[in-house]
Amino acid sequence: MARQAVQTDQAPAAIGPYSQAIRAGSLLFISGQIPLAPASGQVVEGDAATQTHRVMQSIGAILQAAGAGYDQVVRTTIFLIDLADFAKVNEAYGSYFDDPAPTRATVQVAALPKGVRVEIDAIAHLG
């Protein structure tokens, strides 16, 4: 099965040796997105909800570049530096999905790149 990179300038460019997303067959694997402004690559300041909205907008742009939408996301992982932010992140995140929502794991981590509060990765089914 061939792998195809998916790239858009409407989401932050990769800051390391990885792709924004890889399409493999009917699956799209979106790399963890952090709240960076696509044009500048700078961290979007604000609380966890503000940062979650920026992350979800990036995920949406990558989905769109692959010809997909949020309704095709089947799995996400949310990484938080503080589980006390869970309610704010959950509310912001949930506003992007209709029922049935994707499956998900949420974990607290010691740190995230660039000192951000949240990172989210996703898998979508394109078939």
Image: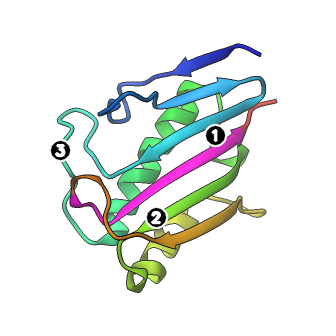
Magenta segment main secondary structure: strand
Q: Which of marks 1 and 3 is nearer the N terminus?
A: 3
Out of 79 and 91, give the one closest to the viewer.
Answer: 79
Q: Which of marks 3 and 2 is nearer the N terminus?
A: 3
Q: Does the magenta stretch include residue 77?
A: no
Q: Where residue 101 appears, x then y in whole percent?
A: 72, 62
Of discs 3 and 2, which sits in the foreground?
A: 2
Q: Where residue 127 appears, x then y in whole percent?
A: 82, 29
Residue at label 3? 42
Where is 89 relative to 84, above or below?
Answer: above
Residue at label 2? 79
Q: Which residue is drawn at 50% across and 33% down?
A: 62
Determine crowd level at label 1: few under 14, some 14-19, many 20+ residues with C-alpha closer than 10 A.
Answer: some
Quadrant in the picture for residue 111 = bottom left
Residue at label 1? 69
Quadrant in the picture for residue 37 = top left
Q: Distance between the residues labelled 1 and 3?
A: 25 Å
Out of 4 and 65, give the one closest to the viewer.
Answer: 4
